[in-house]
Amino acid sequence: MATTFKTLLPGDVIDTRNRLHESIPITGTIVSGTYGPQGQERNIKDYSHGLFQSVFDYPFLSSSANHIFDLTMGYSSNSPISASSVAGYKQQKSKINIYNQMAQVLMGHDADGNIREFDADGDLTGGSKIRQCYFLNISRLLGKDEIKKGSFQIDLGVEPNYDKPFSASLSITDTNAETSYKTNSPAGEYGILKTNTLTGGPSTGQGGRAVVSASHNVGLIFYQAGVVVLSSSIFHGSAQGDQGILDEHHFPEMDMTHTASVAGFSEPGPLNSIFKLFASSSISGACNALRHRIGNISFNNTTELNSTIYFCRANANEFNYSSNPTYLKDSKIRVKADDSRAEPVSYITTVGLYGPNNELLAVGKLSEPLKKTPSNELTVRVRLDY
């Protein structure tokens, strides 16, 4: 029980900031069908509005389920897909609105007040734009304060054969983002996602369609927002009129009958497969298509830990006595064992931090009592995290 107080000087108080990282692996089996066949997974929650899907690590009706991420898609009003409204195009207005909403939040507006489109290389003054994309919104539970730069990786199956999509897989990462990340976003820092390693090769049984396999910019990752933007170019074919690896056989929800060409794609006949998917499939159907080809997702999250450290110093002539009633017996100090020549002894078990009006604000307990006598000095380090 303290009866005297020692004022902490400026040199006794230090503020620090630490970043703690946790490795987060998300296996593709959870995303693409652990809890049921496609379209019936009990850990995939579809909503009546049909604007996005929520992915859980366990059937979402269970109290044990944890929200992993939300998945949706959209395209720009400048995209060839939105150039004309073909009968059968599903949720076109919603898809454009989703793209505009995400772009407005993540990329902001230009000097004329127009919403900026997602830029493939982060150079807002020009370069190629990402006008058709998937949006993967990582939950706060996993992403914490931000995703660690340079740690993100997603593996996608790119084999044209729908029954064995991972016979060829493409790794997409934000390699070297620690030094090359961009800061020209109102949502914070973001990195460029690039194709990394192509394992296997797409079979030639369906036209020998090529996929992106070299180091190409195929998306963006916004670290503080926890949002991944994946360009549709990942699934493009080798040529403008090629169907790519995602053909109509794989997506029964798509309109199989129309053969209208899209502005910018002069070849008549069926549209490029991924564009056909974006145009003719519902948002949920397009999300199902991507989930079927997600192998693994991994990243390190970041928790920013702010701390104030107090160095509580007990000098040689301080805190050698206690006002605890049990400290005395028959008006004598118990720990001196009736030896009047012995020096006083106290045992420090608790440190209290007090406010300016001597109100107790925080208490720190020691793991074991510390012996304090006039012949020694102690410094107890107290850390408050917030």
Image (tube, rainbow, N blue to C red):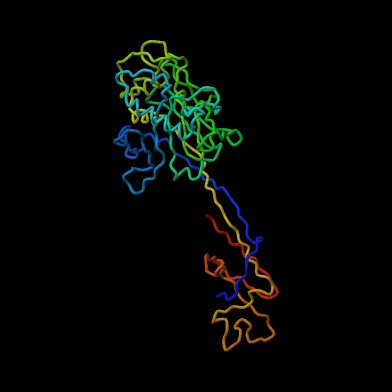
Rendered view: 118 above or below 315: above
Rendered view: 196 above or below 299: above
| Position of residue 85 measured from the top left corner of the image (x, y, whole percent) | 34, 19
Q: Is residue 218 left or right of residue 71?
A: right
Q: Nearer the viewer, residue 266 or 251?
A: 266
Rendered view: 70 above or below 359: above
Question: Residue visible at 54% across and 82% down?
Answer: 325
| Position of residue 179 measured from the top left corner of the image (x, y, whole percent) | 61, 35
Q: Nearer the viewer, residue 155 or 219?
A: 219
Where, by quadrant of the figure, is residue 44 drawn? top left
Q: Nearer the viewer, residue 384 or 188?
A: 188
| Position of residue 102 measured from the top left corner of the image (x, y, whole percent) | 43, 33
Where, by quadrant of the figure, is residue 269 drawn? top left
Where, by quadrant of the figure, is residue 374 drawn? bottom right
Q: Residue furthest bottom?
A: 330
Question: Residue visible at 41% across and 41% down?
Answer: 68
| Position of residue 32 measured from the top left corner of the image (x, y, whole percent) | 38, 34
Rendered view: 174 above or below 258: below
Question: Residue visible at 41% across and 18% down?
Answer: 80
Q: Which quadrant would the N terminus be assigned to in this image? A: bottom right
Q: How many marks?
A: 0
